Image (tube, helix red, strand yellow):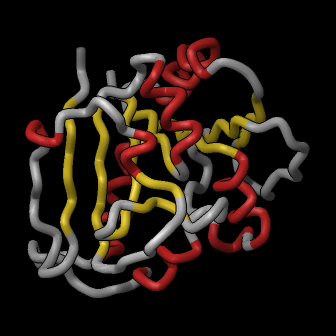
Amino acid sequence: MGGTIYYVAASQDGFIARGRGPGEWLRAFAGAGEFADGSGEAAHVAEFLAAAGAVAMGAETYRSFVTDPGSWPFGSIPVWVFTHHEFPGISGADITFVRGDVAEFHPDILHDAGQRDVVLTGGGNLAGQFLDSGLVDEMVVTVLPVSQGSGLRLTHVVEGIDPAGAREPSMGSAVLQRRYDLRR
């Protein structure tokens, strides 16, 4: 059975979002070239999606896809959106809108994922709820070579996680990826 993994990108000064915005700053890195292992960004995204059996995200992350439905990368992977808002669906996507405690829905998300991973994506609010509930097995932080100066800090989300336990596979000359094993 797969695990529950939080994937997040952070600026080198430790921010994961500007203000309340989802991740517009990340678009500057789309197609940024090859990583140290010789593969391109597309190969890493394909690997990430191949491991995903289900995805969980919050309202702000989903909102970014609603405004640009052509950017929907999840195909028919089941996606769970935690929100208090009403949103339209995306044609061809398998989306379940829920509100409530993440622990209540986690067994159903795991069921949807089957033998693959549940992937948490997007900002820190939802990830913080999963982390606080002890439901995250691994956290993958990709640190990009940009400073934001303000916004939502990664440390706000991951307080209490020991950075000494991180593995840091190289992804390129300026991109660092930290992997934290949080299995209890």
Q: Position of residue 77 (x, y in %)?
A: 57, 45
Question: What residue appears at the point 16 percent right and 42 percent down from the top-left corner?
Answer: 163
Residue shown at 10%/37% (left/top)?
165
Answer with left or right where residue 67 lies relative to residue 5.
Answer: right
Vertical order, 17 against 7 (above or below): below
> Left or right: 115 with respect to 108?
left
Q: x, y percentage for residue 120?
A: 48, 41
Q: Is residue 153 left or right of residue 51?
A: right
Return the residue nearer the eye: 37 or 92. 37
Is 15 in front, or is 47?
15
Image quarter (top left, top right, bottom left or bottom right) of the C terminus: top left
**Left or right of 42, for residue 90:** right
Location of the N terminus by quadrant is: top left
Q: In the image, what residue occupies the spot 36% across and 69% down?
A: 11
Position in image of residue 167 (x %, y %): 10, 47
**Horizontal and vertical percent for residue 83?**
76, 38
Q: Is residue 142 above or below residue 26?
A: above
Task: Tell me where residue 95 sits by quadrant.
Answer: top right
**Residue 27 visible in the current orientation:** yes
In the image shown, does 29 or 80 lie closer to the viewer? 29
Residue 49 in sight from this viewpoint:
no
- Residue placed at 43% from the left, 27% from the top? 131
Q: Quadrant of residue 29?
A: bottom left
Give the total number of marks visible in the rendering: 0
Residue 91, quarter of picture: bottom right
Q: As rendered, which of 11 and 7 lies closer to the eye?
A: 11
